[in-house]
Amino acid sequence: MEFVISHLVKSYGSKQVLKDVDFTFEEGRIYGLLGRNGSGKTTFFNCINSDIDINSGEFYFRGEGNEKIPVMPEDIGYLVSTPTVPEFMTGREFLKFFIEVHEEIKPDRTIDEYFDYMMVPEDDRDRLLKDYSHGTKNKMQMLLNIIAKPNLMLLDEPLTSLDVIIAEEMKNVIRNQKQGRITIFSTHLLDVAVDLCDEIVLLHNGKLEPIDKSNLGNADFKEKIIAALKDQDDA
């Protein structure tokens, strides 16, 4: 399966944020969406998630027979850098409620097995979510998407403000979850994109431009990317 974006345009008044975006993402790969803060990464995700309307263009899944498959809400998992959780619930109550509300989901593990997979400490599982650390809240957000098994994962700078250990744990989970789905991971940090992602796409001047990772060890090539991002920021 592929996720195809065709001639996508999004403007806010006279400011055009996304300009005729064309790109095809393949299943089983992690794509690093690289761009400066304010480059339009979150706008891009909000368009795909149908949180905001687009001006023109389309996006869809393409199956093995080349057929267009509409993107449904349940196809998308969306992680944001600052998670919002029901703070009056415990972690266990939250997972149980999520599974009960989404009757179409068929869990393949017990709740404690999910907690174990995400390395949520046992003494946190029955605590109120309001007492969770930022990193553990991020883990809970990721866990919902692991349970739901969406075809497309949108990760909007989910490692921001995480400590080193939790960031590495989250990277490993993202790597382990890439098979059978399309993963787009946005970041403004080149080193994170190189470390985690199979392919890197630069959001520059409102368009997506692929970057050959094999050149990233070359200092001159890195400088060109940084110069392009700076040029975008100054525009």
Image (spheres, rainbow, N blue to C red):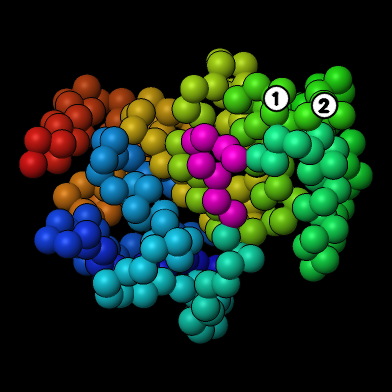
For image coordinates 29% across by 48% down, the residue present is 40
Residue 205 screen position, x and y as percent: 17, 50
Q: Amino acid at mark 2?
A: Arg
SS label for mark 1 = loop
Query: Image height check: is 107 above or below 71?
Result: above
Q: Is residue 189 left or right of residue 128?
A: left
Residue 79 screen position, x and y as percent: 55, 45
User: Mark 1 and 2 residues: CB-CB less than 8 Å, in contact?
Assistant: yes
Q: Is the stretch drawn in magenta largely helix, strand or loop? A: loop
In terms of depth relative to the viewer, which is nearer, 232 or 81?
Answer: 81
Q: Amino acid at mark 1?
A: Tyr
Q: Is residue 151 left or right of residue 15?
A: right
Q: Which residue is mark 1?
A: 132
For image coordinates 25% across by 67% down, the residue present is 9
Q: Which residue is mark 2?
A: 127
For image coordinates 27% across by 54% down, the residue present is 208
Query: Image height check: is 38 above or below 131?
Result: below
SS label for mark 2 = loop
Residue 222 screen position, x and y as percent: 23, 28
**First to last magenta residue range:** 77-84
Q: Which mark is residue 206?
A: none
